[in-house]
Every structure is written in structure tokens, then in C-alpha cells.
Amino acid sequence: MFVEVRCDNEALVHRFLKRNRGFMEGIGMTMEEGWASDVNKEAREEFGEVYSDEVYMNWSRKYFYNPSMVNIKNSKNLYVVGNDDIPNN
């Protein structure tokens, strides 16, 4: 069984940024420091050394919110949940 939650990709990208910014603050780092870390070496090679929210969102669009990564084929066991109500989610 699959559950597909439908939401505007841009809303997801912005939520991802906000959530990760909070995570980074929680561990005492900035987004810039996280981007500069060794774990993000390949991301920097592709998207540039200098962090910006736009660079981060472009990276997340390609690797987390690319429609081909989340495309669930129709199935009799597919359930769809709408998730576009950003203020209440």
C-alpha cells in the first residue's frame, strides 16, 4: 500500500529550508557552516562554494523534490492526502 501526500513542490522546498535551518541552529551551526562542511563537498562542486538560500533550495529541488524521485504510479492501493494547507501543517 502507498500513501501519496500531494503538496506544491515549492511549499515543500521552503519548508525543507526552514526545517533544516532550525536543525542547524539546534546543533549550534549556521546554514553557511553546514554548506561549507565536508559532507556537502559534492553539493558545493555542483552548486557553488558560496551558500545562499537560493543555492540551497536549488540543491534540494534537484535531489529531494525532483518529481521523478517521488512519482508514485497509480495503484488500487494508493491513497492520496492533500497537504497544501501550509499555515495549519
Image (cartoon, rainbow, N blue to C red):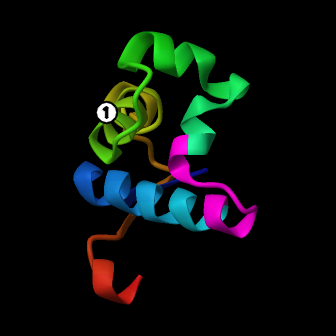
User: Which quadrant of the view contains residue 72?
Assistant: top left
At horizontal 40% and vertical 63% (from top left) the residue drawn is 15
Q: Residue furthest right?
A: 27
Q: Is residue 65 left or right of residue 44?
A: left
The residue at which mark 1 appears reads as: 58
Front position in the image: 48 or 88 = 48
Q: Tell me the residue at 39%/34% (across/down).
A: 71
| Residues rendered magenta in the picture | 24-32
Residue 75 image position (x, y, % from top left)? 44, 42
Q: In the rendered image, is residue 1 in sight?
A: yes
- Mark 1 neighbour density, 10 Å: few (under 14) some (14–19) many (20 or more): some
Q: In terms of depth relative to the viewer, which is nearer, 89 or 25? A: 25
Tell me, yes or no, whether the highlighted magenta stretch contains residue 86: no
The answer to which of 83 and 16 lies nearer the viewer is: 16
Above or below, comparing residue 21 to residue 64 in the picture: below
Classify 2 as above or below 74: below
Location of residue 20 in the rendering, given as x and y in whole percent from the top left corner: 55, 57
Q: Tell me which amino acid carries mark 1.
A: Asn
Query: Above or below — where is 79 with respect to 54?
Result: below
Q: Can residue 79 be spotted in the picture?
A: no
Above or below 18: residue 65: above
Q: How many marks?
A: 1
**Residue in the foreground of this view, choosing between 70 and 46:** 46
Q: Residue 50 at what x, y percent from top left?
A: 40, 29
Identity of the residue drawn at 59% across and 31% down: 36
Q: Quadrant of residue 54?
A: top left
Q: Residue at x 67, y 31 (%)?
A: 37
Q: Quadrant of the C terminus?
A: bottom left
On screen, residue 59 versus residue 7, left or right, reads: right
State the SS at label 1: helix
Please provide percent x and percent y for residue 2. Answer: 55, 50
